[in-house]
Image (cartoon, grey):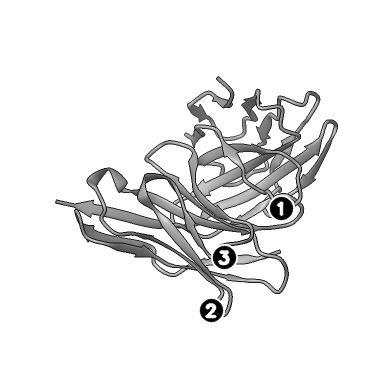
Amino acid sequence: DGGITQSPKYLFRKEGQNVTLSCEQNLNHDAMYWYRQDPGQGLRLIYYSQIVNDFQKGDIAEGYSVSREKKESFPLTVTSAQKNPTAFYLCASSILQLGSNEQFFGPGTRLTVL
Amino acid sequence: AQSVTQLDSQVPVFEEAPVELRCNYSSSVSVYLFWYVQYPNQGLQLLLKYLSGSTLVKGINGFEAEFNKSQTSFHLRKPSVHISDTAEYFCAAKGSGYALNFGKGTSLLVTP
């Protein structure tokens, strides 16, 4: 089945540690996205990528980094510079076709900083 | 880029009653609008989308939405809700490039 997988589902981190969240898709989509979700705040865009080896900052990129070495993979690293990393992280992908911004979402990773 | 406002953070409703979840957008250019649903601890699932054409859009699970250009609204409706419709609902609009701008969400709580 085609889809987006995120791992792990739950992740615990000590303060000061970097942690990497995995996102893989087999939909052959060119574009991939990372969102952060906090209660009452909706989804906020962290980073997005429209092509391999290229990515752009979203609205809340500070304290995060990404890479796009393969079309199907878009890992997100939460660095120690992110002051409040506890949140639900969602990865999404889409085709690149003007007029069709529909995004497909993974099941999410819940990160908790201890 | 378009910004999105969901007017209600929580909507309680009794089972089998009708419901409307409100969404307003701001834009002066072409409009692409979406409604997504999120069940607890899961990702988002597309309910319906408006790209062009008919202003009444039908989606999955009996939901529909009406695009109203004069009122810049895209409200989501269902004539009779079920307990299983309890979830978080997000309205979204085209953002920068191919990204989406999401509203803050509306929590729909259906009770017997």
In terms of image quadrants, where is residue A6?
top right
User: Going from the N terminus, do you reach mark 2 or mark 3 first?
Assistant: 3
**For discs 2 and 3, the disc positioned in front in the rendered view:** 2
Name the residue type under label 3.
Val
In the image as oriented, which residue stretches furthest toward the left? B112
Residue B11, above or below A81? below
Disc 3 chain ID: B
The span from disc 2 to disc 3 (Cα, nearest Å) is 13 Å
The percent position of residue B67, horizontal first and vertical second, equals 53, 67
Residues indicated by labels 1 and 2 sit on the same polypeptide chain: no
Disc 2 chain ID: B
Q: Identify the residue shown where x is 25% and y is 56%.
A: B80
The local crowd at label 3, few if under 14, some if 14 to 19, many if 20 or more residues have their Cα within 10 Å, is many
Looking at the rendered structure, the secondary structure element under dot 3 is strand
Looking at the rendered structure, the secondary structure element under dot 1 is loop
Q: Identify the residue shown where x is 67% and y is 71%.
A: B27
The percent position of residue B23, horizontal first and vertical second, equals 48, 66
Name the residue type under label 1.
Gly
The residue singled out by tag 3 in the image is B4
The residue singled out by tag 2 in the image is B71
In the image as oriented, which residue stretches furthest toward the front? B54
The span from disc 1 to disc 3 (Cα, nearest Å) is 18 Å
